[in-house]
């Protein structure tokens, strides 16, 4: 069985943010980092070369495949920020809460567990913070943190 392509690394989050090309994207990455730290209480970790994660969890599928992944996080991509909201993917109650919050967020696109935002000025940051909190709490409920 293949290993996960995206794994936690020892790379510096601050050094990565310093390499973000566009000054606005770099500043927004710092804003997102502060938001995620505040909501999760976690120190960030680099996952692969460009994903910043807050907390991790271990999963195991019925197929036997298992691994570790970030509980929540983001990546300041060139075109859009990718925000990883895993709770709605794993839990119907959280998915319903996400729908309500997303209707009030502002300009965005979404995938199964990803939220795409062009720039932070396009969205309500209080609603974004609620989305991160709801999804992080769901992940902690579904995959209780190991002490």
Image (cartoon, helix red, strand yellow):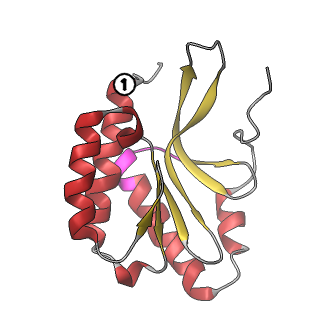
**Residue that carries the numbered disc 1 in the rendered image:** 142
Please report the bounds of the magenta region as a residue range.
38-43
Front residue (pair 124, 38)? 124
Front residue (pair 10, 88)? 88
The extreme right residue here reads: 2
Is 16 positioned to the left or the right of 114 in the image? right
Local crowd size for mark 1, using a 10 Å CA cut-off: few (<14), some (14–19), many (≥20): few
At horizontal 56% and vertical 48% (from top left) the residue drawn is: 53
Residue 111 location (% of width, % of height)? 48, 56
At horizontal 55% and vertical 22% (from top left) the residue drawn is: 59
At horizontal 29% and vertical 43% (from top left) the residue drawn is: 95
The extreme bottom residue here reads: 23
Q: Note whether 39 is above or below 2 in the view shown.
A: below
Quadrant for the N terminus in the image = top right
Is 107 positioned to the left or the right of 101 in the image? right
Q: Is 56 inside the magenta-drawn segment?
A: no
At horizontal 39% and vertical 45% (from top left) the residue drawn is: 41
Front residue (pair 92, 72)? 92
Q: Note whether 21 is above or below 117 in the view shown.
A: below
């Amino acid at each position: 069985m293949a290993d996960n392509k995206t794994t936690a690394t020892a790379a510096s989050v601050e050094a990565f943010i310093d390499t973000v090309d566009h000054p606005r994207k770099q500043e927004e990455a710092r804003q997102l980092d502060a938001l995620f730290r505040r909501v999760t209480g976690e120190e960030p970790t680099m996952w692969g070369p460009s994903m910043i994660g807050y907390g991790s969890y271990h999963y195991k599928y019925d197929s036997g495949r298992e691994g570790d992944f970030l509980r929540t996080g983001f990546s300041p991509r060139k075109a859009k920020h990718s925000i990883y909201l895993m709770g709605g993917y794993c839990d119907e109650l959280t998915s319903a809460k996400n729908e309500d919050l997303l209707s009030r967020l502002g300009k965005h696109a979404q995938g199964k567990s990803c939220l795409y935002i062009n720039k932070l000025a396009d969205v309500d940051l209080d609603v974004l913070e609620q989305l991160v909190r709801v999804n992080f709490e769901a992940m902690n409920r579904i995959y209780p943190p190991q002490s």
